[in-house]
Amino acid sequence: MVTHMKNDIRIGIDLGGTKTELIALDHDDIELMRIRKATPAGAYRATVELLADMVLQAEAELNAVASVGIGTPGAASLKTGRMKNCNSTCLNGQTLKQDAEMLLQREIRLSNDANCFTLSEAMSGAAQGAQVAFGVILGTGVGGGLVVNGHLVDGANHIAGEWGHNPLPALSNNDLPGPACYCGRNGCIETWLSGPAMSTSHHLNSGNRLSAKAIVAAAESGDTDCIRTLGEYYQHLARALATVINMIDPDVIVLGGGLSNITTLYERVPTLWQQYVFSDEVRTRLVPPQHGDSSGVYGAAWLWGKQ
């Protein structure tokens, strides 16, 4: 396998359920090219071949052999090396890293999409310069990542930042045992803070089934049921993030995913988390992402740092 690259080119790939995006960066982090293609639905082998074809296409156009980092919707098991917890279920149980390395004949680096998001925002985005940055994905699921002094923290079990599968704190007796989670437990943060969770909560409270995006729009138009749902969401997010602050005391928390577009979160949540944080003053900043939807692909390239 190729272990040393011929150029200072870093390729990052964001492997999503519907689209796969590639970016190539030079040593100064200048974007050289970007490729987007549809992800083969439910087809593992075609997905691996797509990854390899995109890399080879980019390298041919750039006349370079690049390092390759891939952000995935799940993680590789330390026990088996096979993918697990992927929303794109065709990846689960597969040796994605090894198969991609076989096709490309070089080492690649792979991390989950929340890690890549956080690394991107810490290195050149909304959390740049922070000693401790915590990144949050609020979308169809809830994930997180941790970067300390510019270095991604994986942890001994490669689960650092996985706050979404801890119980939501300060639940009332009426909340227990909490919604069922796909992980087999009840009341995980993800079951309260994901987009589908907001929709479900609203349906239980009002009888109306709306998407999270529709709930936010209706709340802005004065719908009282949607205002209530959004208010509960603020409270849940504040309590969950307060626990993160109590544990790792980050300088910055960056929100990503579809629900990070709710602009009122950035004002309301910090006013609510104060009562749950074990300090008389909270200086942690809650901010939107600078790179938006491109954070994941930038972070994947950054898995190699500078060559």
Image (cartoon, rainbow, N blue to C red):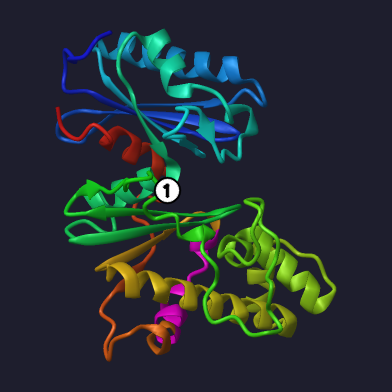
Quarter location, residue 93: top right
> Which percent across, then down, holds residue 35?
43, 25
Callout 1: SS:
helix
Q: Is residue 269 magenta?
A: yes
> Which percent across, then down, holds residue 57?
39, 12
Placement of 93 over or under 50, stated as above or below: below
Quarter location, residue 270: bottom left
> Which percent across, then down, holds residue 278?
32, 85
Q: Which residues are magenta?
A: 259-272
Q: Amino acid at mark 1?
A: Ala
> Which percent across, then down, holds residue 229?
67, 77
Q: Nearest the camera: 301 or 249?
A: 249
What residue lies at 14% left-to-right and 27% top-to-bottom?
Answer: 307
Q: Is residue 88 left or right of residue 300?
A: right
Q: Is residue 1 left or right of residue 82?
A: left
What residue lies at 60% left-to-right and 20% top-to-bottom?
Answer: 44
Dominant SS in magenta: helix
Q: Is residue 264 in view from this perspective?
A: no
Placement of 220 over or under 73, stated as above or below: below
Placement of 36 over or under 188, stated as above or below: above
